Amino acid sequence: MKPGRISSALILLALMPAGCHRQAEEAPPPRANDAIVIEPQASLLTVPVDADISALGPALEREIPRTLWSIDETGLECLPSKKVKLAFVKLKTPKIKCDIVGEARRGPLRFTGTGREVVFTMPITAQVQARDIGGVLKRETANARAEARARVSLDMTPDWKLRGKVTITYRWIDSPHLDFLGRRIDLSKPADKKLAPIVAGLERQLGAELAKISVRPTIEKAWAAAFTSLELNHRNPPVWMRITPQEVQYGGYMLSGHRVQLRLGLKALTETFVGDRPADPAPTALPALRRMNGEAGRIAFFIPVIADYRELEPVLLKALVKRQQRPFVVSDLGTLHAEFRKATIYGTTGGRIAVGIELSVWGAKGYLKKSSGTVWLTAKPSNQPDSRKVEFTELHVGGGTDMVGSKLLLGFANAPELSATLADALGQNFEKDFQDLLGKIHRAIAEKRAGKLLIRAEVTEAHTGTIRAAGQGLYLPVRGSGIATVKLAE
């Protein structure tokens, strides 16, 4: 940003309105010393926190025995009686009893996370024997395969601990059965009776192991690191945004493999400071979890476009010196020549600027003697919201100091010919400099490391407010917002 170029036109626009008869001031306008105060903005930044859940697999492997259950039961009803029509006679077959012996073993656990679910798969193989079948067959063996699957939906407790809602299902891939005298003997019912408590135990163990995974220390580190200040503009002027976290909101998670990424929203105040880097706010203890109600990942900022009066002075003087090469034609005064020697600009009271021009004026061919001194003008800058086109109102042209021939000097300063010439030569607005500023901010926060914090942001929207003159400079406020992610740096 080149503040001198930005606002030289704004100062000169103060000279545009036609003058009128005014009393000369005996002293320069008072200097204002009010600072530019920028109100804090509320931001809700996305803070992704990664947690490793790979320890769940080995923990469950240790807790769940390889042999899941065994069966050794006698006198079970393997086949119920059945009514059979033979010719014109209905007969009822006898019940067939048998003894059931067997066991089920599990294979290695497999688990992965995708989307919003952690899925555990436990393969089961079973070997079941039916012995002394109806007193006819001595022994028959059935091999079977089943699969138990646990689906875990994660959640977070108010004190930042993981918990899960576990849903267990199982199915027989190849259920245990025998064929006997053309009839099927289904052995899955006694197997189901044994498998049910195993499934319930798996659910309890999963919940216990999830509670052991500690994510709070990582969240605490991210919370403490967020109490920092971020540089938005390096110079002309230096601008800083100070971040003061207020609360952390929980907005869900995403799973990928053995890692879970928690979606957290860091609600913070973002304050803008012009000048030196402000002191970091003192970190506070991590507060209790709050549920996220809206969209996270939004950052708000309030940036001042400031034109330093001291840098505007040589720019204004250069324009005046260039213009003095040609004569001025002033109503009632005729053709005049002018010599501009110095320009003084500062903020005065009432949100106005004061412009002092040290000059000499004389008539062509010597018909008016040279008049010298400093002429003072004050004016109030104004613009429409979201417009970078600036005008000046409430113009006042006064006298000044060390004036000789004040009537000639004041008549010259009030001349519309002078103000129109200056406006045509230097009239411009803030638009290019506004776009340059947004580019600087975008580059500053596109990926910024602030201490242990890595901030990635994109400016998506910006609006300009109403310009005003302060003691520190001409100030055009820019309110912006964007998408932001804050992450604890590796």
Image (spheres, rainbow, N blue to C red):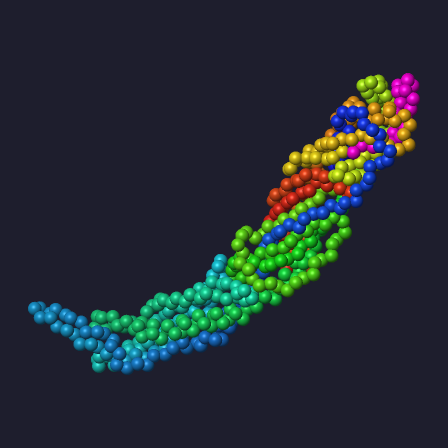
Task: Specify whether 259 is left or right of 330.
Answer: left
The spot of residue 142 in percent (x, y) is 31, 74
Q: Quadrant of the C terminus?
A: bottom right
Q: Is residue 66 magenta?
A: no
Residue 212 figure quarter: bottom right
What count of labels does the image hold?
A: 0
Point 34% across, 72% down: residue = 192
Point 78% across, 25% down: residue = 19
Query: Which residues make up the magenta segment?
Result: 357-378
The spot of residue 215 in percent (x, y) is 57, 66
Point 64% across, 37% down: residue = 386
Q: Is residue 371 magenta?
A: yes
The furthest residue to the front? 23
Residue 104 to residue 469: above or below: below
Residue 324 to residue 256: above or below: above
Task: Specify whether 325 is left or right of 189.
Answer: right
Q: Can I make out residue 199 in this image?
A: yes
The spot of residue 336 in percent (x, y) is 86, 21
Point 78% across, 34% down: residue = 378
Q: Nearer the viewer, residue 261 or 9?
A: 9
